[in-house]
Image (cartoon, grey):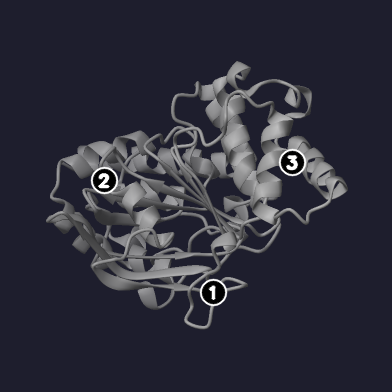
Amino acid sequence: MYLIKATNISLRLDGTDILQSISLLLYPGELTGLLGPSGCGKSSLVRVLLQMYEPTKGTVQYSLSGSGSKGSPARQMFGYVPQDDIVHRSLTVEQAFGYSYVLRKGPGVSRDEVKVKVKALLHTLDLQHRADTRIKRLSGGERKRVNLGIELLTDPVVLFLDEPTSGLDPHLDHQMMKLFRELTLSGRSLMVTTHILTNIEFFDTVFFLFKGHLVFGGTPAAALEYFQVEDHELIYTRVRSARPAQLSDHFRKSPFYEAFMQRKPREMGSPGLQHSEQARPDQGPAHRAGEHGGVASKVPVSDRTEQHASDRPVGSTIEDELQKLKERIRQRKEQEQKEE
């Protein structure tokens, strides 16, 4: 069962079209990437899902525990970590967590409960050794984790993070993505907005936005095949050379879109993509042999040979699968060049 379902969402602000007919699903236990260049509408879409903006068109449905009778979720079911710091920099880490917990739970909360909660959170975020350090003296990565911790205090069902790795070096970016991955294992859903594609393999599902249009949704591996590129960074080059409306229309008419919308949530506690591969577009009712390929493909979808998750050897990882897919794309391009 989905947690959030957006259908044909459009948003117009001050006479400007921000979002255009976007549909998506969020499932429990998924790490989702909302990707795209700066100014493409990522933050605006998150604000629509958080009910901070009223969509001009379309609907957003919720299936969250604690939702109201009309499907409006209780605010405590959400967590939202903005790009800027949300904590007082003069407090220590332990003080920030403790004060925030009391403010959110109310004056009736016991000291013992606060102590237990803060201790557990410090352990989760690997900040035990920094508990008595003032936030202004923390590194950039540590401050990011403190901001994340403030929202984790109330155990949200869905947590939205706006550019949480912005400004971090590659190592810290990788460590943060590992942390996000771990936070989904209990069934919590995380949506991360970012323009950085370096560690895209950590995501179960990715949504690519371009100028307010959804131009792809699916797994990171499927994105490589759809855009016919060997590296995710090259996707931006692909989308910048085409009109956003055409890209969106092409995706909606492709079997990738049907496979994406018909996907099932991954099993709780599974480590991620290697056990949750998106259904191949050439399987089931989504198959249109040779009718709709990737965005730059001359190859019929039915000719593609992406290995299904259940056929993978034991111990295979998503990095292995992505490397194999890149090699198949490279070989196919070499074959096309020879034929030309």
Extreme-right residue of the structure: 112
Nearer the camera: disc 3 or disc 1 = 3
> Closer to the N terminus: mark 1 or mark 2?
2
- Confirm whether residue 259 shows in the render: yes
* Image height of 319 relative to 30, above or below: above
Q: Nearer the viewer, mark 2 or mark 3?
A: 3
- Asked whether, in this view, residue 291 is left or right of residue 176, the answer is left
* Residue that mark 1 sits on: 63
Residue at x-position 77% and y-position 41%? 118
Against 88, residue 317 (above or below) is below
Mark 3 sits on what residue?
121
Residue type, numbered disc 2: Cys
Instruction: Indicate the quadrant containing the C terminus: top left, top right, bottom left or bottom right.
Output: top left
Q: Nearer the viewer, residue 44 or 68?
A: 68
Q: Amino acid at mark 3?
A: Leu
Q: Of the numbered discs in the image, which one, if any, rests on residue 275?
A: none
- Per the model, the C-alpha gap separating discs 2 and 3 is 34 Å
Q: Which residue is mark 2?
A: 40
Q: Secondary structure at mark 2?
A: loop
